[in-house]
Amino acid sequence: MAFPSFSPRGQSSGSYSGSETEDDEPPVTVVRAELVRNHRPVVISEVPVYIGMKDRQGRFFEDKGSCPHVRYRWLRGPVIKPCVFHPHKTSQFRDVTKTFQYYCSKECFLRGWHKLPRHMYCSKPESMPESGSPAPVANGDAAEEPEAEWAEVAITRQYCPSTDDIDRPLRLEIIPLMTDGRDALTGGMSITTGTVIPTPKEARTRRMISRGGSFSAEWLSKHFKVMNWNILADLYATESFFPYCEKWALSWSWRKHLILKELKSMTADIITLQEVQKDAFEDWFRPELAKAGYDGVYQQKKRDAIFHRGNYTVEGCATFYKTSRFQRVYKYVVDYDNLSAEELRCLPNPQDAEKGLQRASKGNIALALVLEDLHIKTTNGDQARGQSGGHLLCVVNTHILADPGFTDVKLWQAHLLVQTLEKDTTNMSLLVCGDFNSTPQSAVYEYLRRGMLRGDHEELQNDPCGLLEYLRIGHSLRMSTAYETCNGKEAEYTNYTEDFKGTLDYIFFSSDTLAVLAVSQVDEEAQLQQETALPSSTRPSDHVSLVATFMFREDAAADGQTTGLGLGAGGSPYHHGSGGSVGQLDAPQLSAGGGAADGLFTSGGGHNYGAAG
């Protein structure tokens, strides 16, 4: 029998030709066959395909490999080289007169003709024409190219490409079967993919920048590393948001490998991630990071689930920690919507309360974990300690509202967060990490960093529902940011797209109990521009990860390692009173259960209503 001809990349071909009587109609026919979101196949990653079938009764269903009335056949095509300048793109031309290299566009071809270093030239194949002028040839038309041959590589519905498939397209043929087992001549389809690309390379090395000072081996053994990253949920990784990024580079099957490699390469003791889909946490991050010694906790945002790739899913925050270094004491959630409802319920005018609540309720949350350090015991009686005597560290992971037109809600959420932390983290060291969707010039940043806010800040003018009129701005958490402390300024970019380039992500820490030793260098703009912007084929998110190394301040002072790190003996002006031992069930509103306990903080209190201060 004759199978259909080579179809366009990622598209389905038509039905098989032939003639059969009505009695010879196969039990099922293929009505739809396509790659998921124009996926580019990756070595050792299953090629995601959707196969829609219809039976004789007219019922439609998706076959995931269990239908007995169809067979599958995977074939491997001829080699199609990638572009010499853009290895993530399939070549469309080859220079047959000078460089003999492959290019994805005419622009790349002309660039190669004039500027490609000689050591990057390919050797001249036989039967190539002699010429002194540029001569691009459409890929596949060169004289030495063999006739396109396709070899069978699998007879299953699922297929994971191997290294032998690199730079070759794949074709999946879906062939309905007659009741007697014969191949039907009609009702089938085929899909042809783009060329297979290798598994993502190991994550790039990023230099750590220290504040200076002398680091003894004993001291370095006491530090811990924290990583924060908005990984870009698959829900939002669309062509409409990122038209400059290759479709396959946006696919989750590609990005998840790059993300995991970067997470593992940083060897952080604590990882805080934003925009993590619930299914990605359960099916990918939790099991994969468990292999590297991490345990993780997830909290989704309070938003309606979105139908995505056949399932309803949501995104939220995930925090992981090395179980060899920390143990979880308890978890709690800062629910901004519930806190807003309790705060605004106190307003004298119910209409104002309802109006404010509608504007403030956006579903954002903060996930807080209280961890006990298993290595370092606290010697300071004013510091909270766990049951084993280790330092207690509260790690907060949040994702503040993104909409730039809602700066009042961003500040409202930041205020609810610090208000909750002031009540519930007494005497604990504090890390507040996340995507704050706020630049260093914003009201949110100034408030968190300074503990107060200038009355003439321009963002205070944006208050359509009067939310900010009822806030008495001010807190005593005394927080610094890791990058400003080490560099004297924030990272230049943590979010880099065509539409926005700036800093939105931070690692805040309680400067009276923690000392930051070093931060990872953020990519220079030239690197971020290699494929226009982020995400790209080598950088899987539109955000850049932040990494910082910390040490409990009392241990640094005890070791005398204070030079250049600002670890003098000066006391904090924000003293919280005497410390005490905190056991695993000492958290407010904890649910009963074995091991670590969980709680949900939704109570209000702490606001002073009246004129803004």
Image: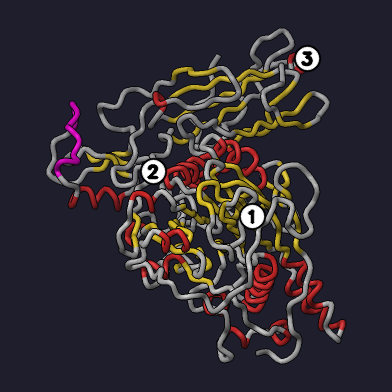
Q: In the picture shown, does residue 117 fall above or below 11?
A: below
Mark 2 or mark 1, whichever is nearer to me = 1
- What residue do we see at 62% from left, 43% from top? 280
- What residue do we see at 68% from left, 89% from top? 612
Q: Which residue is mark 2?
A: 88
Viewer-side residue, 592 vs 75: 592
Amino acid tagged 1: Leu
Q: In the picture shown, does residue 450 fall above or below 193?
A: below
- What residue do we see at 71% from left, 59% from top? 333
Q: Which residue is mark 1?
A: 369
Q: Which residue is mark 3?
A: 23
Viewer-side residue, 310 vs 207: 207
Side of 29 relative to 397 (left or right): right
Assign the N terminus to one quadrant of the image: top right
Amino acid tagged 2: His
Q: Earlier in the sequence, mark 2 or mark 3?
A: 3
Residue 555 % position (x, y):
45, 58
Residue numbers of the magenta segment: 118-128
Instruction: Tell me which corner region of the image, top left, top right, bottom left or bottom right, holds residue 348.
Output: bottom right
Q: Disc 2 on helix, strand or loop?
A: loop
Q: Disc 3 on helix, strand or loop?
A: helix
Viewer-side residue, 559 vs 31: 559
